[in-house]
Image (tube, helix red, strand yellow):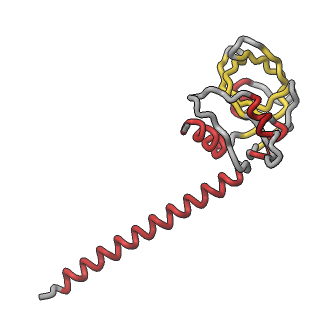
Amino acid sequence: SRNPQRAAATATALMIGLALITGVSVLASSIKSTFEDLLQGALTADIFVFDQDNGFEFSPAVVDRLAAIPESGLISGFTEIDVTVDGEDIAASALDSDVAGQIISIDLTEGVSTVGTDGVAVESDTAADLGVGLGDTLDLTFEDGATESLVVEGIFETSQVVVDALYGALGAL
């Protein structure tokens, strides 16, 4: 014999379950779409080439070889280096500023994004921590002991999407 009350309770539980699954599915799809839109706006490169040697860097010749391929477009090397400024160790990124703004989104707040060989662009929080602004000189000491004085030519905001994409990919290998 059928119990209408039990059938109604079962149907209600099924409807609630279906509504929850549908809601979570729509939410997940929306989050994925939003992240893809953010990433496409932040990174415009078609291909990123990363090392698989536990952090050993590519030779700069790799960038030259890739640039020599007629089908390739913009090419930029990217490396992370440790430098010391005023006794403070800082993780710095080095890349070709002539093309960087065309392959990643750089939110420049002051100055220029294409810096010369004697210039540097500094992330805004780092600039504030170091007490430097446009036109100031930073005396950098590299890991090998070499020193270089560079003029602050640009100040930019960090894009967390770019940071996560670049360093997430680097950390994944």
Quadrant of the rendered image containing residue 68:
top right
Residue at figure coordinates x 76%, y 13% from the top left: 146
Relative placement, left or right, of 121 versus 15 is right
Regarding residue 27, the answer to whether it shows in the image is: yes
Give residue 52's position: percent from left, percent from top. Answer: 58, 34
Q: Quadrant of the N terminus?
A: bottom left
Give residue 57's position: percent from left, percent from top. Answer: 66, 27
Near-viewer residue (154 or 59): 59
Quadrant of the rendered image containing residue 88:
top right
Near-viewer residue (28 or 136): 28
The vertical placement of 109 against 132, above or below, is below
Relative placement, left or right, of 150 versus 15 is right
Quadrant of the rendered image containing residue 125:
top right
Regarding residue 128, the answer to whether it shows in the image is: no
Give residue 164's position: percent from left, percent from top. Answer: 60, 42
Near-viewer residue (117 or 22): 117
Give residue 76's position: percent from left, percent from top. Answer: 77, 38
The vertical placement of 57 against 8, above or below, is above
Residue at figure coordinates x 22%, y 82% from the top left: 7
Query: Which residue reaches farthest bottom?
Result: 1
Q: Quadrant of the C terminus?
A: top right
Relative placement, left or right, of 153 versus 161 is right
Residue at figure coordinates x 72%, y 17% from the top left: 142
Residue at figure coordinates x 62%, y 34% from the top left: 51
